[in-house]
Image (tube, coloured by chain):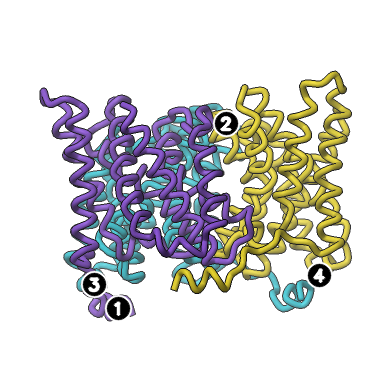
Chain colours: A purple, B cyan, C yellow
């Protein structure tokens, strides 16, 4: 599927650029910027591959390494103008998350894991690059606080798993479950949704 | 050994709930709370399994996944009342640490590692879930600052290793070394002990 | 090569002591100090071994474990005087970085990785112990902000890779590429160089 590869590369570009933006904000030097871009783009997949004891993908296939190098240089050079393409970036990023989720679920199914673990692997592939980025930048991961996209990944990954034993063709399953991730995230951002916070005040009282 | 499984589950519950409490304090959303509960409960064992290149336990046996899900939901619902069961929680937690220590040492012995590495694996199994929890919550790990329980784990793990080549039955070794971990920690908390801090003032002077 | 082993041990000592100094500054307890010393000294190599799915070196050969224990005890006892030997420490540290870089590249070549990955593995071996140290101490890794030594490692690692297919003897390649790492770092520190920071003001404006 050529289409998937293209979208996957667009997703990697979006993740790498999101890493560069975070690193610039933290005033890191060029080496730091490159590492953060790299970790944001491949961190989730790397953690997944270590957990399922598979070969780490980017170490054997350098396409994504080159894509990340290129995106980082591009983002640093055009850092002043990134504001203008922010909307397109957000779209790539959302598509990237959808694709990464599907890649993760597929790897889990191929390795014979339980459905719950497959859904977790899909979500991890999509979300943990950002978690590692935030840890390296000394922040509480944003996805633990106000981003709903983990929920989008979990829904899309579950759909993929439910459909993969039906006679529906794989291409179509990818489109359906990918669309679920994308639509849930777009709706969430459009309506400014986030997961309801557990009442804090009570907790603060209980804890003090 | 049915007894060990039961206590192991109680320990997992205690670790998961401790993760939920930390996450609530940090005002994380439900996804963040679940991840922190999960990492706190299985993080130490996962790091151990990656280091010794074994299969990651919770990915193939879902009992603990369900236990963590259940504990997290329970802890969130009854968050107001957790103050009342704090004492029982502390006990579960201490028992959990003791059990996790023994599991880690046993895995190290089974894989033929040197005694020092076995003791390190036991301590890591018991302590690194909490370390990862603190890193994700953007804190310096509490165990590096004022908790004595790593010392308790090291003592218990060493006892286990010393006894396992004697004719003493395994059940009895588990009870002895587990009790050492529990008693050292209870005594430390009761007498408000912590490891002596290295003189700071001197250091500050040296460093500045 | 006896010489390499000796210098490697000196490097481990320097890394461990740098970990102790950071941990003392953060007012950690003895357990925390030992863990930070350990992570600083072996963290980079451990991450490398996990990524290339090799056995983690220090778990099977305890020489370095003993060296780290010894260095930690030494550094804690003589913490008041470490100021005086800071210059020698810096030299050991620089030599250690050079050696760790070469060890990482060699492992990558032996496992048949692409040159870029080999250079990355060398740099990772030399630099990520410090990154993990800073994460555990709740700091943004210093190497992402103002240290030029990653650049020194990348240059030395590239030289090693370029030379290893020539008829030059391995010993000589080690000396050349190691010297590049050392000289670049010494020059950088002497002339107070760091990588140029990307203009921040623009970025702040773009982001806000």
Query: Is label 3 in contact with label 2 (beta carbons under 8 Å)?
Result: no
Which residue is under mark 1? A204
Give the number of the mark in front: 1 or 4.
Answer: 1
> Residue at the spot x=73%, y=40% of the render?
C100
* Chain for disc number 3: B
Lower position in the chain sequence, tag 3 or tag 2? 3
Point out which mark residue A156 bears: none
Specify few, some or many for label 3: CA neighbours under 10 Å numbering under 14, 14-19, or 20 or more.
Answer: few
Q: List the residue tagged with mark 2.
A: B113
Nearer mark to the viewer, of 4 and 2:
4
Disc 4 + disc 2, Cβ < 8 Å: no
Q: Residue furthest top?
A: C167
Q: Is residue A59 left or right of residue A165?
A: right
Q: Indicate the secondary structure of the residue bearing disc 2.
A: loop
Q: Please name the residue that numbered disc 4 is placed on.
A: C80
Question: Are both tags, 1 and 3, on one chain?
Answer: no
> Which of labels 4 and 3 is toward the front?
4
Q: Quadrant of the C terminus of chain B?
A: bottom right
Give the image location of residue A190, x and y in percent.
21, 63
Picture coordinates of residue B144 (x, y %)?
A: 55, 62
């Amino acid at each position: 599927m050529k289409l998937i590869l293209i979208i996957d590369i667009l997703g990697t570009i979006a993740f790498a650029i999101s890493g560069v933006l975070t690193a610039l904000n933290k005033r890191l030097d060029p080496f730091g910027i490159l590492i953060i871009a790299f970790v944001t783009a491949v961190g989730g997949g790397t953690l997944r591959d270590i957990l399922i004891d598979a070969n780490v993908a980017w170490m054997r296939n350098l396409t994504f390494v080159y894509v990340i190098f290129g995106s980082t240089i591009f983002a640093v050079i055009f850092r002043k103008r990134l504001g203008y393409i922010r909307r397109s970036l957000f779209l790539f990023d959302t598509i990237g998350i959808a694709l990464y989720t599907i890649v993760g679920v597929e790897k889990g199914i191929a390795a014979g894991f339980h459905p719950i673990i497959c859904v977790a692997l899909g979500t991890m592939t999509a979300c943990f690059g950002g978690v590692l980025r935030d840890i390296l930048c000394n922040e509480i991961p944003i996805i633990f606080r106000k981003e709903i996209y983990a929920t989008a990944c979990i829904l899309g990954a579950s759909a993929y798993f439910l459909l993969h034993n039906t006679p529906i063709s794989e291409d179509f399953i990818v489109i359906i479950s990918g669309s679920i991730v994308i639509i849930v995230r777009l709706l969430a951002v459009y309506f400014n949704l986030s997961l309801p916070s557990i009442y804090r005040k009570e907790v603060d009282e209980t804890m003090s």
